[in-house]
Amino acid sequence: MVPRTDMDFETAIGLEVHVQLRTKSKAFSRSRCSFGEEPNRATDPVVLGLPGALPVLNGEAIRQIVRAGMLFDCTIAELCHWDRKNYFYPDSPKNYQITQQEKPICRGGAVEIELPGPARNVQGAHRKVRLNRIHLEEDVGKLSHGGSRSLVDFNRAGVPLAEIVSEPDLQGAEEVAAFLNAIRTYLSYAAISDCDMEKGQMRCDVNVSLKPKGDGPLGTRVEYKNLNSISGVRNAICHEIDRQSRILSAGGKISQETRRWDAKGNTSEGMRAKEMAHDYCYFPEPDIPPLRLSESELRPIRESLPERPFDRQRRFQESYGLPYTLTSVLCPSRPLADFFEAAAAGGADPKSVANLIANDLLREMALAGEEDFRIRPEELGELAKAIGAGRVPKQRAQDALAEAYRKRTGLSEFLENLPAPEDREDGAGQLKELCQRAIGACPKAVAEFRAGKSSAINAIKGFAMKESRGKVDPALLDKILRELL
């Protein structure tokens, strides 16, 4: 091998993302989908491949994968059918997997991703990553290795999977992380999948290839299978790019293979030569007839789709005037974005509502370790309106929100005890009198302020706050003092 130290490489990365669809039963049987049960309880003769047991297509799985395809602007096939992928491995009780090789249900499409911004809380660039296909297949069982033996649990076998296959459009670990985050957000938004990687509901295979910059065809690809965390995917890609660049710089060649990723050691090792399609001896599944989808069946599925997360974020910025920092907190979670819109619907200032949610409500939820809002959105909207109308100091409102969340009491009693609108004029008059007394009591600070020392107003405000025992709104106090001065 002749070392090449002047080489600059281009990276091409393609992903195969496997996502468990949210259905009650499995893809081709009535056996229930479950997590955390005792091993081998969620099975039936179809899952176990017993003689004479015939598969039956799950209609809800079809609806969910069509929704996923529509969400990513895929072309939905008028006619699709299933194939058998033959391989011998302990996690597959039938020794084959029902999948779609020749005629998948969704082709093409793209996933919009947001690349990281130049700084934290700064909007990054958006672009679309092309998809090759999305097809439906069944999951396999789970192997557990320990000591000299391996155990297999078939509870997961047969769970419907959407396999989302990208084109090799991704160029680095951060882009891949953005791609996976986008898929997880979109599918969770539409209730297609929970995408919980810790539960194995979302896993991916990564194909990485390098080539000298400017060369035509893609380089030889190396695959990492069943990566189940975004950090693991990121680390494996960085490792593989470094490994291939060192080999190519030294004049070597990359072998097309599947490698095993060791997350603890942050290293990899070769497992086997990469399989090709003919290695699996695909042939049409004889027990499941082809599926034809009509427009009358597709229309209600299309109408069930939610507004897409990035579209909603852009609308929040344009229609509500919210900054990116707030929309990037609200919009990735559909329940949170829905809560915001319900709270702002009553006429409260949208930015005030968003700040109460992002800075106060979410803090209390995190401290409690819960996803339950506990506060009705209408109450939070009324609280924001009360702050804007000067009926309650902002800090007092934030304290009331925190107390109501912790005690699960809601905000209705607190809102009912606030000064009525007709009392505000009297309150404003009393506050003006208080400010006039403060001005009279602090002649030195008044002179300094009028001479151009803006910080001198703090002494006057301090006197007024002490006189009111801290019960006045500091922002309103500041406004009236400046008007009088």
Image: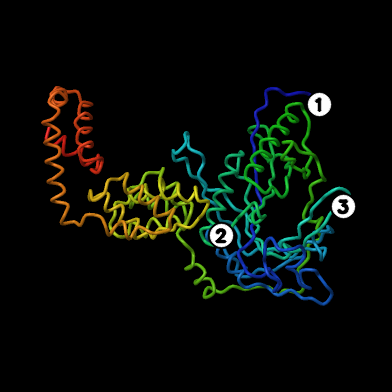
For residue 74, the mark is 2
In front here: 445 or 343? 445
Disc 2 is placed on an element classified as loop
Percent position of residue 362, x then y: 45, 49
Name the colouring of the figure. rainbow
For residue 1, the mark is 1
Mark 2 surroundings within 10 Å by alpha-carbon count, few (fewer than 14), some (14 through 19), many (20 or more): many
Q: Quadrant of residue 259?
A: top right
- Residue 424 higher or lower than 120, as above or below: below
Identify the amino acid type marked 1: Met
Percent position of residue 91, x then y: 80, 59
- Residue 462 higher or lower than 226, as above or below: above
In front here: 251 or 347? 347
- Residue 29 higher or lower than 426, as above or below: below
The residue to which callout 3 is attached is 149
Mark 1 surroundings within 10 Å by alpha-carbon count, few (fewer than 14), some (14 through 19), many (20 or more): few
Identify the amino acid type marked 3: Arg
Q: CA distance from mark 3 to mark 2?
A: 44 Å
